[in-house]
Structures are given as C-alpha cells and as structure tokens.
Image: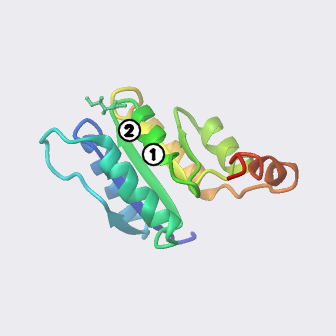
Amino acid sequence: MLVLTIAIGADHAGLPLKTQLQQALAAEGHALIDCGTNDADSVDYPDFAHSVAQAVEAGQARFGVLVCGTGIGISIAANRHAGIRAAVLHNTTEARLTRAHNDANIACFGARTVGVEVALEALSVFLATEFEGGRHARRLGKLSPPV
Ligand code: RB5
C-alpha cells in the first residue's frame, strides 16, 4: 500500500472522529502531520482548516483530513486557499468521484453526521483513487476566476 504524508486537523466537535481516523491512518503506516486540536476546549474551526490547507499547499502533505461538527464549516475555510479542493464526504461514492473528477486534496468529515466506519471507508477510497485528468483537468482550470 502507498504510504502518504497526511495533514490532519479538527475543532473540538471533530476531535473524537479525528482521533479515530488518526489511529487508523497511523496503523496503516501513513505519516501524519497533526495540526490539532487535541483537547476538548472550544476552538474555532477555521484555524485548523488553515493549518491543514497550508501544509497541503506547501507540499508538506500530499493530502489533508479535516473534521468539524458537520464537515461544512471546515471545508469552506479550507477552500479559501487557492491550491485546495476540499470535499465533505458521507460515503465511498463521493470519496471516489471527488478524487477522480475534482482532484480533491482534502477530505472533510462531520463528526456529528457520519459514523466512524463510514468515515474510515470513505477515507480509504479517497486516498486510493487517482485523478482521471482529461476533461476534468480542463474543468479544474476553470475553478478560479482570473485575477
Ligand atoms: C462547532 O460547534 C460547530 O459549529 C463546528 O464544528 C462546525 O460544525 C461548523 O461548521
């Protein structure tokens, strides 16, 4: 299996699921950059989204994983970064298609909306699926408006 460097982060709501995903990724041999949070104190999800997004944008990590209550806020924050395509995942179909078609580089989960088994399976498919390129690459080129 391919060993990857993965940046992972969560807010307080996402911490329980982040911990479970972290343990599973480490057990599979992946190298992790832990961007926090690591305790139950209330924190602001954009801070962790930006840390993970910066690690991916800088090439320090191949992929990112972000968890908040719904996965939505943290994905919105991550997607403010030019080089980031963050997708909220609820199943393996979304995981496969967002890699194949969107070349997504951050997988986001809602700890209040998906169970750990579903998240683990979706993450595994996400990490294993290649971008298809071709017409999808042309469309990615149109994601950012001209500056
Ligand atoms: C925190 O309570 C919650 O708002 C946050 O985790 C997330 O769901 C925001 O999108």
Residue 110, compared with residue 34, is above or below; it is: above
Q: Quadrant of ligand 1?
A: top left
For image coordinates 65% across by 36% down, the residue present is 93
> Which quadrant of the rendered structure holds the N terminus?
bottom right
The residues bearing labels 1 and 2 have C-alpha atoms spaced at a distance of 6 Å
Q: Quadrant of residue 68?
A: top left
* Residue corresponding to mark 1: 120
Q: Residue furthest right?
A: 135
Mark 2 CB near ligand 1 (8 Å cut)? no
Q: Nearer the viewer, residue 113 or 29?
A: 113
Local packing at callout 1 (Cα closer than 10 Å; few below 14, some 14-19, many 20+) is some
- The answer to whether the residue labelled 1 contacts the one labelled 2, judged by CB atoms less than 8 Å apart, is yes
- Estimate the x, y position of residue 69 in percent, counting from the top left: 33, 31
For image coordinates 40% across by 58% down, the residue present is 52
Q: How is the image coloured?
A: rainbow
- Estimate the x, y position of residue 91 in percent, counting from the top left: 56, 34
Helix, strand or loop at disc 1? helix
For image coordinates 47% across by 38% down, the residue present is 76
Q: Quadrant of residue 55?
A: bottom left
Q: Residue 116 — which label?
A: 2
Q: Amino acid at mark 2?
A: Val
Relative to 66, is 12 on the left or the right?
A: left
Q: Residue 47 — which label?
A: none
Q: Residue furthest front?
A: 147
Q: Amino acid at mark 1?
A: Leu
Q: Nearer the viewer, residue 23 or 86?
A: 86
Residue 119, compared with residue 35, is above or below; it is: above
For image coordinates 45% across by 57% down, the residue present is 53
